[in-house]
Image (spheres, coloured by chain):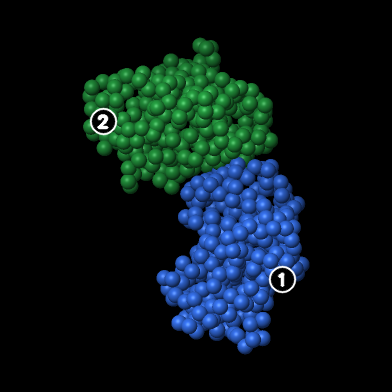
Amino acid sequence: MTDTAKIIVGENPSDLAKDLAVAAAFTRKHAIASIYHAGSGHPGGAMSSADILACLFGAEMNFWPDQIHDPQRDRFVLSKGHGAPALYAIAAHHGFCGIKDSLRLRKLNSPFQGHPHVLDLPWVETSTGSLGQGISVALGMAMGLKLQKNPARVYTLLGDGELQEGEVWEAAMCAAHHRLDNLCAIIDYNKLQSDNSNEVIMRLEPLAAKFRAFDWAVAEVDGHDIVELLSAFRRASATHGRPAVVIAHTIKGKGVPYMENIPTWHGSVKLTREQAEDALAALGADGSEIRELLDHGQ
Amino acid sequence: MASDAPALIATSGDSLREAFGKALSALADEFPKVVVLDADIAGGTGVHHFRKSHPERFLQFGIAEQNMMAAAGGLAAVGHIPIVTTFAVFCLRAIEQARLSLCYARRNAKIVASHPGIDVGPDGGSAQALEDLAAFRAIPGMTVISPADPLEMAQATRAILEFDGPVYMRTGRSPARRLFGEDHVFKIGKGNILRDGCDVTIVACGVEVARAMDAAELLAGEGISARVVNMATIKPIDAELLARCAEETGAIVTAEDHNIFGGLGGAVAESLVSTRPCPVEFVGLQDTFGASGEPDELADAFGISAPHIAAAARRAITRKAAQ
């Protein structure tokens, strides 16, 4: 992958990869802290999507805090709206919002609702939280941008359980029909959903073949490998005449050993102080960072 | 700014859907942000006119209304004014998309629903939406409109394009009688008195306005003076006009091609109980589904024809007298 990485990130590939790894770690720690303070939330999917979000916000997308009203900005839609804590965290990392403000998750009078709301946060592109709708909204944006000959791209992150919504496949058919090559969907494929595994609840496989059959350009990557993710996003951007999907194989709860691959941590769950401390320690936080996040966060 | 509208409806007796489609096509150059979303029934909803005049802004979604409805939110997010068009029953199918991706996100998007009520006729009960006014009215921030004649439909089409916010508007399938003169002015949120009277007020919307006028004529033959109000905006309802009618006539009848629950009748009753309570009788489908038949046959069979409205008016007047 070294050659690819150089092509992707230019002269200092290791610096960018390092930055993105730091952003991903921050995202996980911040999400854990905000869910702890909230007393509820979805940690499992926030952990699994952190590397994807770090790559999108830190490298792939042309979307920075000084361009939230720029018509040519790339758009991001969190179709899996329950992944909000991770979105707020990566946004805080890049300065879209305050770090301490965004720890006020799910609180009265806080703009950081349990699911993202466009009227609360100016850098959120649309309200999500009902699975299946985000990809359609992203598709509408991509269609409109094409009509306007606007070169901006639209990225949307979906959960794997979300793919059970019929609307996703309506959107998949429509995006291919309209040749929306400015649309990139990413699947956070952690194999688990609210109650159990996809395999038990409703089988998704053969997933890549399904998207190929819908005439999408498909990439399958390790969703925790930054170089693979960036490479897949580059290939998606270079795709002409078809929408692209990056199927990112991930681990639910990634980085927090007691959560990994256990559906209980899909959420919504309440984290005890001990659980939050254990999670943060596993994610590399030292004592003072843990105290900072858990004591002074509110 | 309704001055252009009359020219759009040169064909008298146009259905409301055709009047809408012609108006939209005629207004398209003036509103360059408008895009029209279709789910393979442009011929039925009237937007075949727009498809012909402005093909580059006509977006085909296939028979997939949920995706179409939410995609409208995305189109609005990047600056378009999306007009979602399909049959009223299929709007119900995508109501949660309208709720989240249009209303909750406060998008400037319009849903224009053809084939509402038993006015659908022969397609039968499965195709006749009797719940849409109630359902869409219940969504926070949604404006709900049901014009009555082709002229008003053309004016309302302009009005919803000028209005910033989500709108649900009913058109209609069957040929619609002209009710308004060229001086009529449609305004969102305003009802208007179409015929004056002092014994009872009939408040109607959509195809029931013409039947309400017929009912007033029947009542006049019996010496009863009925006022007819065209309440083309169901939400926000014209509370001031309703209170005035209750004050001046003391009895109200509502008439709609919709279930009796939650639609125009519900909106009128909710308003009057807090302003000027008076006897109210509801004409609509009595919590039942429709069936196949011609619209007027169905109106007779399901209790929303002019004689039914007149009977409701007599009941309201009797109740008023008993107070």
Question: Label 2: how many residues lie within 10 Å, few (<14), some (14-19) or many (20+)?
Answer: many
SS type, badge 1:
loop
Using the image, tell me which numbered label, if any, was put on residue B177. Answer: 1
The chain letter for the residue carrying disc 1 is B
Q: Residue at x 46, y 72 (%)?
A: B272
Residue A9 is situated, as x and y percent measured from the top left of the image, at 49, 20
C-alpha gap between disc 2 and disc 1? 69 Å
Instruction: Identify by letter the chain in green.
Output: A
Give the camera-side residue of A92 and B258: B258
The image's mark for residue B166 is none
- Which of labels 2 and 1 is toward the front? 1
Say if A178 sits above or below B85 in the image. above
Q: Secondary structure at mark 2?
A: helix
Residue B150 spot, x, y in % from top left: 69, 67
- The shade of chain B is blue
Q: Nearer the viewer, residue B296 or B189?
A: B296
Residue nearer the viewer, B131 or B303: B303
For the residue pair B316 and A142, the one nearer the viewer reads as: B316
**Disc marking residue A294:** 2
Residue A38: x percent and y percent?
32, 37
In this picture, is B173 found above or below A250?
below
Q: Hey, what amino acid is under mark 1? A: Arg
Residue A34 located left or right of residue A176: left
